[in-house]
Amino acid sequence: MVKILLNGCNGRMGQMITNLVKDDGGIEIAAGADTYQGITNTYPVYAKIGECKEEVDAVIDFSNAAALDDVLSFCTEKKIPVILCSTGYTPEQLNKIQDASKETAVLKSANMSLGINLLLKLLKNAANVLGPAGYDIELVERHHNQKLDAPSGTALALADSINDALGNKYEYVYDRSQVRQKRDKKEIGISAVRGGTIVGEHEVIFAGTDEVIEFKHTAYSRSVFAKGAIEAAKYLAGKPAGMYDMSDVVQL
C-alpha cells in the first residue's frame, strides 16, 4: 500500500484525487496540506506541508507554482519522492526542480493523463514511418473558452514528440492567413480552437497521398489528470533520486 501526502488537497484536483483513491486498493492518502481549511476530509489536513507528521511514501503536489519552495524543501529533507502536477514554473524554479532531483525522485509532466503520455510514444513511432514517406503533419487542439494560452502546452508537447523523432527538422506554423504559398513539407501546422466547456481535445493528422491517419485524444473531465497522478505516485514510490516524467510511468 502506497501512502501519499496530497498537497493542495482541498482544491478541485485535490478533491478529485481524494475521491478516486477511495476505490483504489493500492494507494491511500495518509495526510493532506492546504491553506484552505474549509473542507472536512477523512485524513488529517495541515495548513502547511512542513507541518505533516505522518510517514508517507510519496507527495502529490496539485497546489500552485508559488508553493514549490516549501514542497521541495519538505521532500528533499525527508527524501520523499514527489510528483509535481502544477504548471507555470519560472526558469529559476525549473532549476530548483533539477537540483532537488539530485536529492530525491522528482516526477514532472506537462500533462498527467495516461492517454496523452501513451499518445506521445505512439506518435514517435508513427512519425518515424510517415514523416520520411512525405506525409503532411497537422495538429488541432480544442479547449474551453476560459483558457488563456494558445496553443496548449500539451499540443506543443505532441509536436515536440513528433519533431524529435524526425531529427527536429520541422518548423511550427500557427497562422497561414498572412502568407499565400504552398505548404512546406518540413512544417507542422498547429491550430487552436476555443469554445464552450471543452475540457481538452488533441488531434494529430498525418495526411498523405490518398490516405489520412489520425490520432485523437479527448478528455471528458479533469479526472484523467487525477488518475494519472495516482498512477505516477504508485510508480515513483521507492524510486532513487532523479528526474522522471510520465513516459516512465507509461511503459509500452
Image: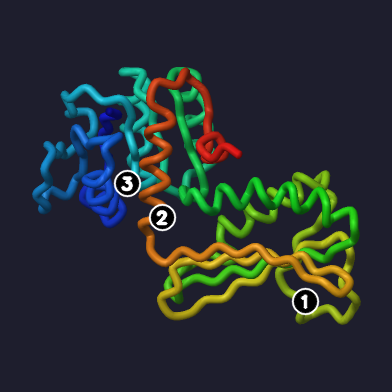
- In the rendered structure, which amino acid carries the disc numbered 2? Val
Q: Earlier in the sequence, mark 1 or mark 2?
A: 1
Q: Is residue 209 above or below residue 5?
A: below
Q: Determine which quarter of the picture holds residue 173.
A: bottom right
Element under disc 1: loop
* Mark 1 and mark 3: Cα distance apart in space: 38 Å
Q: Which residue is mark 1?
A: 176
Q: Is residue 170 above or below residue 2?
A: below
- The answer to whether residue 229 is left or right of residue 163 is left
Q: Which residue is mark 3?
A: 63
Report x, y in % for residue 71: 33, 32
Work out which quarter of the rendered image holds the N terminus and state it.
top left
Report x, y in % for residue 44: 12, 37
- In the rendered structure, which amino acid carries the disc numbered 3? Ser
Nearest the eye: 104 or 205: 205
Total marks placed: 3
The residue under the point 61% across, 59% down is 155
Label 3 packing within 10 angstroms: few (<14), some (14-19), many (20+): many
- The answer to whether residue 119 is left or right of residue 161 is left
Element under disc 3: loop
The residue under the point 60% across, 64% down is 216
Q: Earlier in the sequence, mark 2 or mark 3?
A: 3
Q: Which residue is mark 2?
A: 224
